[in-house]
Image: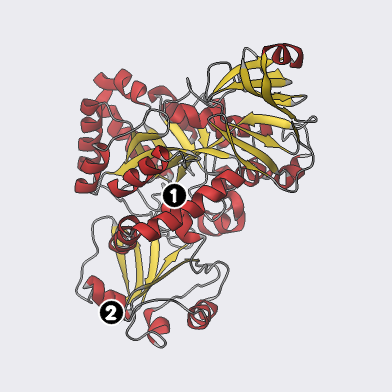
Amino acid sequence: MTDIVFTNGNIITFDESNPLADALAVRKDRIAYVGSAEEAAASRSPDAQVIDLKGKTLIPGFNDNHLHVLSMGDYFTKLNLQHLSCEQVVDKLRSTDQPLRPREPLYASGWDYPDCPSPHRAMLDAHFPDRPVALFQYSGHAAWVNSAFLQKLKVTPSTPDPPGGMIEKGPDGAPTGILKDKAVMPIHFKRFWQMNTRSRLRSMLCDKAMTLFRENGITSVQDNTWFPFTVSHYNRLKRRKELAVRISCWSYGELGWARYWLEHKHFDPLWVRKGPRKFFIDGTFSTHTAMLMESYRGEPENFGLPAISPARLQREIAKAIRQQRQLALHAIGDRAIHHFLDILETFKAEKQQIRALRFRLEHAQLVTPEDLKRLADWGILLAVQPSALIDSKKDRDLLGQQRAVGAYPYRSILREGIPLSFGSDVPGESRFKPLELIHLAVNRQSGERISAFEALAAYTKGSAYAEFMEREKGTLAAGKLADCVVLSDDPTRCAPEGIRDIQVELTMVGGKIVYMAEESPSLSVH
């Protein structure tokens, strides 16, 4: 007998054996039945809750393949500097009341080069001579800091660039206040330490992120957790039955002690799971540090910046094979991906083990056609984020027209049979709502656009496969977890340009309704 029955709906299951249905029944935390309304009605218990979808669309819950939960909560609660000039950034910092202790660092994020082309520490020093200020560029791969924060970091004119990072210096040899890639990591760790160890702050940021997940139909996330304290917090929420999203917790390979303790925490097979081990191979387009085969437009000597040495990457791959661990490798530029594949060639004897471990490349924004074939041969998964499609002009400015048109090669990835998954990378990218990102993937002006059905599959079935959970979720079938979302319209049938206007009307996780839109009279619950 069933507890909840969805009926009279347009149910897209992504189950090839039963792709469409008009009813779905739930028993406890599992799907009990998917099929016709008549058979669902016959199996329901007398006191079962019946939800008349009135023709609305029900799909598996969205699964974000790559984000940062606490940083997301932080991004949506602190100062946002998006689309501001350098002068406007400073004005906003000055005019916003910050409840900070004396000399406590001020953090904010979201500025970017097209709007703020020449950030310099002197602009911050003029108004914040004593308080350390750190402003993260929108991708998180650069930071603009004042002299007080440089002093905090012990950065001087004689400080060398760290491996995989850059301390920008002016003609006089003095730091400008711009730090890139690995040079930003000490600032991130200071902020991450605050977010992860201050229990009230951690709870507030986590609650903010969880609310946004529920409201947008996100039932699973693959989280750059990095610190063990947050795993403990997720476990507490799960014990109190307050966790409304399933979480895969990633460790970061450069944080040895945190990686060790995170990977030895208690994990739950369905709710709080041990995720892959993450490393960076390169940087980003926006900071001009993603590794490219051809130089950046207008910078003939700049081909990007490696974030890890070949020897170190080879050692980490060997360790992952020995320990049977999945790797999630940040690789944006075509040279970074080519470099990774060349290192894989030294592991030919372990090829089947690597395929079984489902190594992932995160972002994969520029890939040569030849290397797509190599990725398919090695069984490498591509975990991409359509949020990066929002500014095609920036890509043209950085890469030139020809490369920009071929970037984010989703159609080519599917054509080669490479497993594709979708996510947001929020707050590394500012947009996280799945329907908005699906809209971008479907409506882009490029031969690499994909269909709405393919985009939905990447955000559900594809993301489940990327975390070894395809037997539990990602499709709607009897026996699978009852994680699903009701949409106001069908993305596969509506006009493509209308996908971003579709609303989430209900979110269910583990058979429990965790969100229902108040303004949605279209669902009848009885």
Residue assigned mark 2: 174
Numbered tag placed on residue 198 in the rendering: none
Residue 247 occupies quadrant? top left
Whether residue 401 is situated above or below residue 355 in the rendered picture: below
- Give SS at disc 2: loop
Q: Position of residue 346 (x, y in %)?
A: 24, 28
Closest to the camera, between mark 2 and mark 1, is: 1
Q: Position of residue 119 (x, y in %)?
A: 44, 75
For mark 1, give the secondary structure.
Answer: helix
- Residue under circle 1? 69
Mark 2 or mark 1: name the one nearer the start of the chain.
Answer: 1
Mark 2 Cα shell of 10 Å, populated few (<14), some (14-19), many (≥20): some
Q: Nearer the viewer, residue 74 or 66?
A: 74
Three-letter code, disc 1: Val
- Specify whether 166 is left or right of 379: left
Task: Identify which residue, 46 or 347, lies in the foreground.
Answer: 46
Residues at marks 2 and 1 touching, judged by CB atoms closer than 8 Å: no
> In the shown orientation, is residue 403 left or right of residue 197?
right
Mark 2: amino acid: Ala
Disc 1 packing (10 Å; few <14; some 14–19; many ≥20): many
Location of residue 28 in the rendering, given as x and y in whole percent from the top left corner: 54, 24
Seen at 34% across and 25% down, the residue is 357
Q: Quadrant of the C terminus?
A: top right
- Residue lying farthest front? 47
Tell me where residue 73 appears, x and y as whole percent: 47, 56
Q: Is residue 488 rendered to the left or right of residue 410?
A: right
Residue 497 appears left or right of 167: right
Along the line of sight, the residue nearer the viewer: 510 or 322? 510
Q: How far is disc 2 from disc 1 in space, using C-alphas?
A: 36 Å
Q: Quadrant of the N terminus?
A: top right
Q: Residue at x 60, y 53 (%)?
A: 390
Comparing 181 with 53, the one in front is 53
